[in-house]
């Protein structure tokens, strides 16, 4: 994101109204336009971090089924955002570090950032997250939690610089101070993680969909990586494996599915597409 100005709210609002195929299915058009004007007024007196937060909030106002609309921290920007070298994930019982530059931090629960409890931060982050549904919010907001500009724009930290993270593991509390790093440096900061053989869902991530048997033939695993194209043959392949005598579990893996177009599916069995004369 380049240097921001109050006019950026108007530019974003106009772009949404112009290019979004159905922008106001979740919010009244007049209400959105009023929010654009109010956002422009607010950011006129804000710094870059505050402006980023307000523009994120504006994009997320469109509501559900708009996960592709808005501003995400890892979007490529001429002036990249900064991240603390932790990869948190939101589980049902808390936020846990699933990757970090320091191996001993992996697996610890993230309890607070700069003294603010994580369970207080999550509700503050939710209105900034462009989403398809509540699960999108849960999947994305941990990344917002370690984005320096967002923490600064929300007033959690006074400046983009070192931040204190409070964590907890089986050995008790752990307090660390981390420096933010530009987006491009984050992958290299994780090279200290232990090397493991990559699981199949990653080594085959370029395949649009595939299915195999696991657990000695007792589970059918379905990797569904793209919502596009005729699924008739694939559905038949899944059904053939899923109905084998030993199979008692079907696993549908959507982790790498970023969407697509279900209008490109083939017709249901017994139906035919209308053809041009």
Image (cartoon, rainbow, N blue to C red):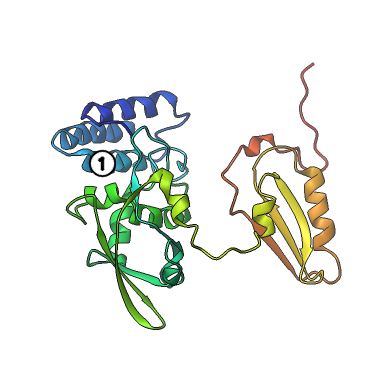
- Whether residue 205 sits left or right of residue 125 in the image: it is right
Q: Quadrant of the C terminus?
A: top right
Q: Residues within 10 Å of mark 1 (few under 14, many from 20)?
A: many
> Residue 72 vs residue 50: left or right?
right
User: Can you say which quadrant of the picture contains the N terminus?
Assistant: top left
Compared with 232, 172 (above or below) is below
Q: Nearer the viewer, residue 94 or 197?
A: 197
Provide residue 47's location: percent of width, then percent of height: 18, 39
Left or right of residue 138, residue 116 in this image:
left
Q: Secondary structure at mark 1?
A: helix
Looking at the image, residue 271 sits to the left or right of residue 90; the answer is: right
Could one spot residue 133 in this view of the protein? no
Residue 8: horizontal and vertical position, in percent? 27, 29
Residue in view at x 79 percent, y 62 percent: 242
The x, y position of residue 11, in whole percent, is 30, 25
> What is the quadrant of residue 20 in the picture?
top left
Residue at (58% x, 54% y) in the render: 255
* Residue at screen point 76% across, 27% down: 274
Instruction: Say which quarter of the image contains residue 80.
Output: top left
* Percent x, y of residue 60: 36, 43
Q: Nearer the viewer, residue 177 or 34?
A: 177
Q: From this viewpoint, which residue is outermost toward the bottom?
A: 171
Front-most of residues 190 and 242? 190
Task: Tell me if residue 104 can be seen.
Answer: yes
Count of numbered labels shown in the rendering: 1
Which residue lies under the disc numbered 1?
54
Whether 21 is drawn above or below 256: the answer is above
């Amino acid at each position: 994101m380049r240097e921001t100005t109050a006019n950026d709210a108007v530019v974003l609002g106009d772009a949404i109204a112009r290019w979004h195929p159905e922008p106001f299915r979740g919010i009244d058009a007049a209400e959105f336009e009023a929010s654009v004007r109010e956002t422009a007024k607010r950011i006129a007196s804000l710094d870059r971090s505050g402006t980023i937060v307000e523009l994120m909030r504006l994009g997320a106002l469109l509501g559900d089924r708009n996960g592709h609309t808005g501003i995400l921290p890892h979007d490529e920007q001429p002036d990249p955002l900064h991240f603390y070298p932790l990869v948190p994930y939101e589980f049902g019982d808390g936020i846990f570090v699933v990757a970090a530059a320091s191996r001993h931090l992996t697996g610890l629960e993230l309890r607070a950032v700069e003294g603010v409890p994580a369970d207080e931060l999550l509700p503050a982050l939710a209105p900034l997250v462009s989403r398809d549904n509540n699960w999108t919010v849960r999947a994305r907001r941990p990344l917002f939690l370690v984005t320096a500009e967002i923490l600064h724009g929300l007033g959690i930290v006074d400046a983009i610089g070192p931040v204190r993270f409070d964590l907890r593991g089986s050995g008790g509390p752990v307090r660390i101070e981390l420096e933010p790093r530009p987006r491009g440096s984050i992958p290299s900061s994780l090279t200290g993680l232990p090397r493991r053989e990559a699981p199949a869902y990653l080594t085959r991530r370029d395949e649009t969909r595939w299915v195999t048997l696991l657990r000695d033939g007792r589970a059918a695993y379905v990797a569904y990586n793209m919502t596009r194209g005729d699924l008739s043959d694939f559905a038949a392949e899944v059904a053939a494996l899923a109905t084998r005598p030993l199979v008692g579990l079907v696993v549908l893996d959507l982790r790498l599915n970023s969407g697509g177009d279900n209008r490109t599916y083939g017709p249901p069995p017994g139906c035919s597409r209308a053809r041009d004369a």
